[in-house]
Image: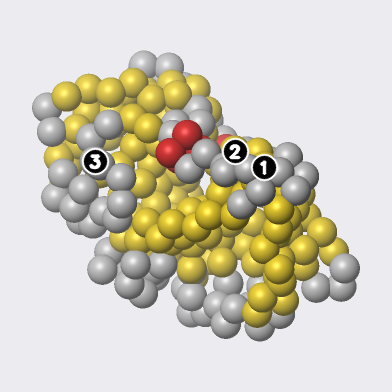
Amino acid sequence: MEYSPGCVFSLAEKNAPIPGCTVSEAICSGETEVVCYSLAAGTDISAEIYFSPKLLIVAEGTLEVGLPGSQTQTLHALDALVTPADVPVGMRTDTSAVYLEINIGRNQSMNQAVKIEEVFRLGELVPYQDGKIVNMDVTSSKTMKFALMAFDAGTGLSEHAAPGDALIFALDGEGVIGYEGKEHVIHAGENFRFARGGKHYVRADKRFKMALFLTLE
């Protein structure tokens, strides 16, 4: 996976749109392919047919997704959508947009709370619970997992090692990530990467929600 582990960063800032252009960068290859797209204002990606669903996650801006039957779904920052397979799907933006496209495969399990072609707000799928950590696997397979977590203030995960490369999306509030002996404060809209085997922990001094993309290849 691209991007250096062990520091807070912004996918949107690292992939700032270039006027008049669309830009793509593969940040994870192999069976679980992840591509970051940057679309400048007034640009588009023409409709194409893919043979497996894609999970789209908007980091910044506004993205319009053209779906079958002349349907269009509009996504804003930290919104997500699962596109259908075997039909044309296109993207465009009037303002600009930076988003991830994760290949989730035909046979991966999908949480029933997520409906294909329907926009969902990542931070709204998991509620806060007093004194608890709430976890939801959105989709998973033998090679990847995409999960959501809501930490009440005063909760956290003890130090452990990542079984694969991981990318964190902070969705709400503020969290503290310990990584290889250093602490990092992360806020909604920011990102963090764990390398395979990297020792880390999560502490929520305040309420905090995050999404976790984990490769298991």
Mark 2 and mark 1 in contact (Cβ < 8 Å)? yes
- Nearest to N terminus: mark 2 or mark 3: 3
Mark before the other along the chain sequence, 1 or 3: 3
Q: Is residue 177 above or below residue 121?
A: above
Q: Which residue is mark 1?
A: 96
Query: In this figure, which residue is indicated by the disc labeled 3?
Result: 5
Q: What separation in Å lies between label 2 and label 3 (alpha carbons)?
A: 21 Å
Label 3: how many Cα within 10 Å (few below 14, some 14–19, many 20+): some
Residue 184: which quarter of the image? top left
Of marks 1 and 3, the one in the foreground:
1
In the picture, measured across the screen, residue 66 lies left or right of residue 12, that is right
Front residue of this view, candidates 125 and 167? 167
Q: Would you say residue 116 is visible in this rendering?
A: no
- Secondary structure type for disc 3: loop
Tag of residue 157? none
| Residue 9: x %, y % from top left | 37, 32
x and y percentages locating residue 59 in the rendered image: 55, 41
- The residue identified by callout 2 is 60
